[in-house]
Image (spheres, helix red, strand yellow):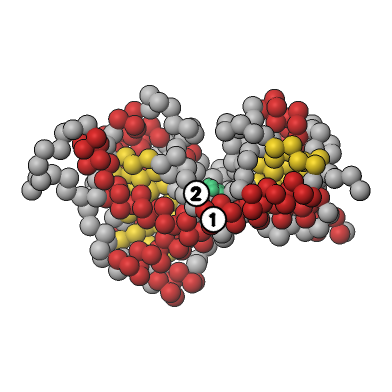
Amino acid sequence: MAKAPVFVTRIIPEAGLDRVRETCDADVWPDPLPPPPVVLLEKASRSEGLLSTLNDRIDAALLEACPRLRVISNFAVGYNNIDLDAATALGIPVGNTPEVLTDATADMAFCLMIAAARRLLDGDRAIHAGRWKTWEPMGYIGQDLLGKTLGVVGMGRIGYALAARCRGGWGMKVLYADVADNPHAETDLGAKRVDFNTLLAESDFVSVHTDLNDKTRGLFNRAAFSRMKPTAVFVNTARGPIHVQEDLTQALRNREIFAAGLDVSDPEPIRDDDPLLALSNAVIAPHVASATIRTRNAMAEIAADNLIAGLAGEPLPCFVNPQVEANRRR
Ligand code: DGY
C-alpha cells in the first residue's frame, strides 16, 4: 500500500522522526529555520499529514488550500499557531504534546525566577565585560524566595508543577488566578484562588502558565505591572504576546517591578534592537523550556503517534479537537 505523503516542517528527534519516516512518505524540511509561508502552503497542499511546530502559522486560508490534509500534529503543547475552529470545521484532527513537558517547563520557570531574583545576569555580564573587581558587600543584592508568595496565572499542569516546587522546596505561599478552581492545588499545596488584581498586588513572584487566547493576549500590560510590588519578579514561560513587551520594558526600566525572567518574547526571535535586551534585570532565554533530551524525545514520540493515528483514521492519542472524531461518528 502506498505510504501517505506528509510534510514535517522541522527536524525533530529520531525517537519520533524514524517512525514517521517508516510509516509515511515523509518530506522533512531540513533547514534550521522554519519553511517560509509560501513553501509551507505548497508542501502542505500536497500532503495528507502535517507535523508542524509553533513557528508554522496554520490559518484558515492555508487549511482551505489543503484539501488532502487529514491530520495536523503540532510538536508543542500550545497550538495558538493553528486556527483550531477552521481545522475543526473542515474535520481535520489536531494533536499536541501535553504532559511530557510539564516538569521541564516548570523547572525552567523556576530557573528564570531564581536567576532574575538573584540578578544572575548582572553578575554574568559584569564578569564577561571584565567589570568585576572584588567581592562587594553592597553589590548584586537580590530577592529571597524562602517564605515568599508565588502568584500563578493559569493553574494547569505546569502552573501546579511550579507551585509544588516552590511550596515544597521554599515554603512559599501560593496564590492563583484562573477561570476555574484547581482543587488539587488547594488541597495539596494550600493554594488560594484570588482575582487577578489581588494576585498582582500580593505576589512576590508572578509566573504565567496560561495559553494564549483572546482573553490572555496583552494581559500583562502597563496597568498590570503597575499593580505589582516594586520587589516583584515577573516570569513568562508561556507565550510572548501574553505580556506587552513595551510595557514590561518600561516597568523594568522604571523599577516598577524588580526583574523579569522570560523564556518567550514578542516577537520571536526578539529583535536585536529591542530595548529589553539592554536591561540587566531581564533574563531572557530563547524559548527553550521544553528543551531537555527526555522531554523532546517524548514530544517527538507523541507527535509521531498523533500523526500516524490521524492518517489511519483513528482518534489521536493527544487530541486537541476531539469533536472532529465525535462528528465523524454521527
Ligand atoms: C510548547 O510546547 O507549547 C512550548 O512552548 C514549546 O515546547
The amino acid beneath tag 1 is Thr
Q: Is mark 2 within 8 Å of ligand 1?
A: yes
Marks counted in the figure total 2
Label 2 element class: loop
Kindly report the distance in space between the C-alpha atoms of the residues bearing marks 1 and 2.
7 Å
Q: Position of residue 90 (x, y in %)?
A: 80, 43
Label 1 element class: helix
Q: Which residue is located at x 49 percent, y 34 percent?
A: 268
Tell which of 106 and 63 is nearer to you.
106
The amino acid beneath tag 2 is Ala
Q: Tell me whether the residue at label 1 lies in contact with that at label 2, contact meaning CB atoms closer than 8 angstroms.
A: yes
Q: Position of residue 171 (x, y in %)?
A: 30, 68
Q: Is mark 1 within 8 Å of ligand 1?
A: yes
Is residue 234 placed above or below 286 in the rendered structure?
A: below
Residue 68 visible (yes or no): yes
Q: Which residue is located at x 44 percent, y 75 percent?
A: 187
Looking at this view, name the residue that lies furthest to the right.
Answer: 1
Q: Quadrant of the C terminus?
A: bottom right
Q: Position of residue 80 (x, y in %)?
A: 60, 43
